[in-house]
Image (cartoon, rainbow, N blue to C red):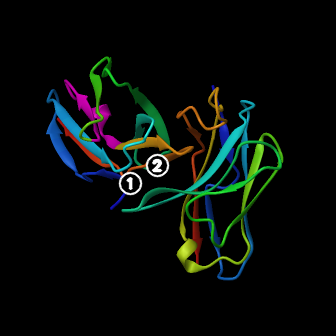
Amino acid sequence: RKEVEQDPGPFNVPEGATVAFNCTYSNSASQSFFWYRQDCRKEPKLLMSVYSSGNEDGRFTAQLNRASQYISLLIRDSKLSDSATYLCVVYNTDKLIFGTGTRLQVFP
Amino acid sequence: DVKVTQSSRYLVKRTGEKVFLECVQDMDHENMFWYRQDPGLGLRLIYFSYDVKMKEKGDIPEGYSVSREKKERFSLILESASTNQTSMYLCASSFPNSLAGGTTGELFFGEGSRLTVL
């Protein structure tokens, strides 16, 4: 079983839609959680950290469910520019573990 | 802005050649990392370093070595390139966390070096 698992997608959604991705992790001792964004042929960049109480940054909401060992990312009012791959990242035992990513394609 | 610069965006090498991938960061970060990224496998950690002259094996160190002689520079070396090392290589740097020297979680990546081994 992979340490961090994501649905690879693609998720194809129209502009203005709300879309959500989940990510599950296997190590219950994982300490910190993040979402990164990677545009096509570009490097990954930190999108947001995920806090225990859930957190929001504009149209983006991240949530953590420790009991079920998953994190989620919700994007409201999708824009064309949101098209990218979203990487779930988990920090445990002094290392960051990256998921393989979920691809989002927003169409007009 | 943090800048992580990788020396080559695209390289083509032959099997058995020695390959150097250079990475320089300008933010005085203690931590530096080398990953490779392959379709369906995501980013996998090859080596990392939390200080000058220090190096630690990641998840897939076989066939690779690293050098960190200066704080800003972290080099990845393929002693004898093989076709299964064809990949996108990403260097990253970060601040340490305040407690144990691990990363805070925010990695700053270079643009990547796409290596093809024939």
Q: Is residue B32 visible?
A: yes
For label 1, the residue is A3
Which residue does the image show at 15% across and 26% down from the upper left? A16
For label 2, the residue is A97
Q: Do the residues labelled 2 and 1 touch (CB within 8 Å)?
A: yes
Towards the viewer: B51 or A20? B51
Q: Mark 1 packing: few (<14 Cα in 10 Å), some, or many (20+)?
A: few
Q: Which amino acid does label 1 sit on?
A: Glu
A49 in the magenta segment:
no
Left of B65 or right of it: where is A52? left
On the image, which quarter does residue B116 sit in?
bottom right
Range drawn in magenta: A69-85
Give the x, y percent position of residue A32: 44, 34
Callout 2: residue from which chain?
A
Q: What residue type is labelled 2?
A: Ile
Callout 1: residue from which chain?
A
